[in-house]
Image (tube, rainbow, N blue to C red):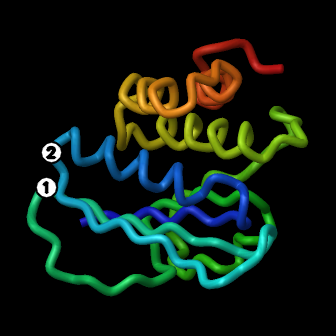
């Protein structure tokens, strides 16, 4: 069993992206446990999306910060991850944008490129079907290395 945690702020699209990653994993015949963690927060408060995935049924229903993979919207979130071997995807200077929705899709593109865990075309199709937004697809492609970086 492997686990992924996505951490951002309310309004960044964390819940939506977590659901799309979960759908991609199900499509690839994984068993998944996907769960957002947020309360009555306002825009800008910290939001988590936990995903456990395995080719076998998942019996452990606990959620914790010891993920195998982490997609972090801010470098400051790094201290929240307890697993020292965790593969972390964090923003870098290559992708500069003030649009946090574009940033999360860029980071998911990098996650796909680095880990190979989910199918790139499947995620691309989900973004297109849900939003019809080519800018978000371009951000995913840039993170994945399919398009020239800005």
Residue at left offset 59%, top offset 38% = 110
Residue at left offset 65%, top offset 80% = 80
When asked about the image quadrant of residue 129, the answer is top left
Tell whether 70 sits left or right of 61: right
Point out residue 2 in the picture as x, y percentages from the top left corner: 31, 63
Closer to the camera in the image, 54 or 47? 47
SS state under label 2: loop
Numbered disc total? 2
Tell whether 19 sits left or right of 80: left
Quadrant placement of the N terminus: bottom left
Q: Which mark is residue 4?
A: none
Residue at left offset 78%, top offset 47% = 100
**Disc 2 versus disc 1: distance between alpha carbons?**
7 Å
Quadrant placement of the C terminus: top right
Name, please, the residue furthest toward the left.
Answer: 56
- Of the two numbered discs 2 and 1 on the same chain, state the one appearing first in sequence: 2
- Where does label 1 land, which residue? 55
99 over 61 or under it: above or below: above
- Where does label 2 land, which residue? 29
Point out residue 83 in the picture as x, y percentages from the top left corner: 51, 77
Residue at left offset 55%, top offset 82% = 82
When asked about the image quadrant of residue 57, the answer is bottom left
Select label 2 or label 1 by which is in front: 2
Closer to the camera in the image, 122 or 110? 122
Residues tagged 2 and 1 counted as in contact (Cβ below 8 A): yes
Callout 2 environment at 10 Å: few (<14), some (14 to 19), or many (20+)?
few
């Amino acid at each position: 069993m492997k686990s992924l945690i996505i951490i951002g702020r309310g309004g960044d699209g964390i819940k939506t992206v977590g659901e799309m990653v979960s759908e991609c994993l199900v499509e690839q015949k994984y068993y998944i446990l996907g769960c957002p963690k947020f309360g009555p927060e306002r825009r800008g408060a910290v939001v988590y999306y936990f995903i456990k995935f395995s080719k076998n049924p998942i019996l452990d229903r606990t959620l914790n910060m010891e993920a195998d993979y982490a997609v972090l919207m801010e470098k400051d979130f790094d201290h929240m991850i307890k697993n020292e071997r965790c593969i972390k995807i964090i923003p870098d200077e290559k992708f500069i944008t003030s649009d946090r929705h574009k940033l999360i899709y860029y980071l998911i593109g990098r996650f796909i490129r680095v880990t190979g865990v989910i199918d790139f075309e499947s995620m691309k199709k989900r973004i297109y079907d849900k939003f019809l937004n080519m800018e978000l697809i371009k951000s995913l492609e840039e993170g994945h290395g399919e398009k020239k970086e800005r």
